[in-house]
Amino acid sequence: MEPGWRWELSAVHHLRLRRHTQDDDTLSPALRLDTFKMAMHSPVPVAELLLRRLEASDGGLDSAELAAELGMEHQAVVGAVKSLQALGEVIEAELRSTKRWELTAEGEEIAREGSHEARVFRSIPPEGLAQSELMRLPSGKVGFSKAMSNKWIRVDKSAADGPRVFRVVDSMEDEVQRRLQLVQGGQAEKLGEKERSELRKRKLLAEVTLKTYWVSKGSAFSTSISKQETELSPEMISSGSWRDRPFKPYNFLAHGVLPDSGHLHPLLKVRSQFRQIFLEMGFTEMPTDNFIESSFWNFDALFQPQQHPARDQHDTFFLRDPAEALQLPMDYVQRVKRTHSQGGYGSQGYKYTWKLDEARKNLLRTHTTSASARALYRLAQKKPFTPVKYFSIDRVFRNETLDATHLAEFHQIEGVVADHGLTLGHLMGILREFFTKLGITQLRFKPAYNPYTEPSMEVFSYHQGLKKWVEVGNSGVFRPEMLLPMGLPENVSVIAWGLSLERPTMIKYGINNIRDLVGHKVNLQMVYDSPLCRLDAEPRPPPTQEAA
């Protein structure tokens, strides 16, 4: 080989001959040999090459420039940097980010073969070309419009064989190709902002961020790499060899590997928080283990008439098998029948023919108030009466139209307090205490109607994110027509309130579609990543989503 020439590895991993410049004389013969070995796929480690280059350098090395010199992928050099960092103070590496302009795949094609408009111009002979034929060319559609706007070509629509395209100028300069070749040659700074913007709009140019490492010598720099021991073995102790071996220092700040375990669904996390709040307030959990309920306990016991729209099949799931409940407390059933059809306890009733067959129909319960009715009936059988505070959190079912905020099944939270002389004021006070524990302090109460409570109130809270008042629950005082047939004393009042579990969960975790929370479309990674629930803390939804 002639002096002044040497082999090197090109960017496409082929050996090529290049005459070195004056600057290349700074490279030692050993470094040139290392490069040649890399080209010949020698087992010289990248980390060892990096250390040798670093030893010959004055200040440091850029990982991207080193990768280009060695003709290898930048990621391979980055891997060597990280492996050397793990050895201690051998090197120091500073992560740097730089932005640069790169051609897209289409931009590279145009830099090589010319722009679409230039190719269209060159394809038009002196006698012109039929527009239909020109449009069939690979660059026809894009190039035609650009060449027209550049006033390189014109269209003669009066031609006998249809519209025909002719050249307007004898020659043209392909500025698009010239600009892309400048970028390709590393001279993107020669282009103005307007020129770069135009190339970006045409998706020929892209701005990319390149992350590189600036590598310099560390306090324990050495070109020889010795493996650091990670374990102290019995053999090292018995032989005494541990005295001469380097040990890798312990990283006491490193996180251990998380053990494989199950993860609670966000709905269960919020449910646990609500349950804890009720228990802190002295409530007892009611049994709610019967999803299938009779129409009697779900509707009739709550003084809800049998012709009420909520009992229609459009709102309720009725069962075919078993279609009817066989066991009902008949003495209580007769008192409920009399209250509905004839009145009593100071009420005139609904004045209709109450039917036992309708009350026996089985259904999927539409609310957990049926469980409250069962609990209050059991309470009425205990003498003497003892004040109680009950709560329940369980699933209910309704024949709803499915959308982003409604499912056919959801969870209902319910609280019930029974005591002597309870009033609307007691209800409002306990509601304020309950919602304060949830982190909701701004409350408003609005009169409402429920078949089994009188008076009734809807509870609203001011939503800081939505900047408006939103409904957070419903409440009321159970009617005497519901309580007295059970056998409760006349001076006993029962206050109650309820809300859904899904809505606060969606707000808390920033979920705007209930089908992303419950159902077959749930992303299990969401269950894995969801943090613990703190209802008294401000919700922080992800930035790309809005709270429901």
Image: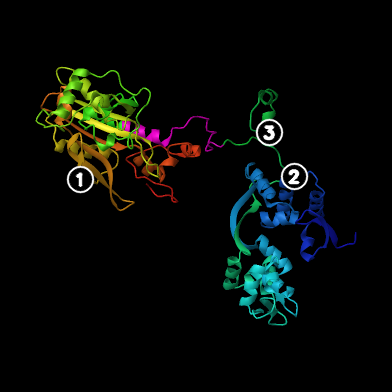
Pointer 3 or 2: first along the chain: 2
* Cα distance in 3D space between marks 3 and 2: 22 Å
Query: Residue 305: where, in percent of width, then height?
Result: 21, 32
Pointer 3 or 1: first along the chain: 3
Q: Which residue is drawn at 67% across and 64% down?
A: 107
Which mark lies nearer to you, 3 or 2?
2
Query: Residue 109: where, in percent of width, then height?
Result: 70, 64
Three-letter code, disc 2: Pro
Query: Residue 452: where, in percent of width, then height?
Result: 20, 33
Q: Viewer-proximal residue, 359 or 463? A: 359
Considering every residue shown, the one lying at the far left of the view is: 346
Pointer 1 with pointer 2, Cβ within 8 A: no
Residue span colored magenta: 251-275
Mark 1 = which residue? Answer: 446
Residue 253 is inside the magenta segment: yes
Query: Residue 254: where, in percent of width, then height?
Result: 54, 37
Please give left or right for residue 261 compared with residue 31 in the image.
Answer: left
Three-letter code, disc 3: Arg
Instruction: Mark 2: give few (<14), some (14-19) or many (20+) Cα within 10 Å.
Output: few
> In this picture, is 452 found above or below 127?
above
> Which of the labelled discs sits on residue 45, or is there none?
2
Residue 158 is inside the magenta segment: no
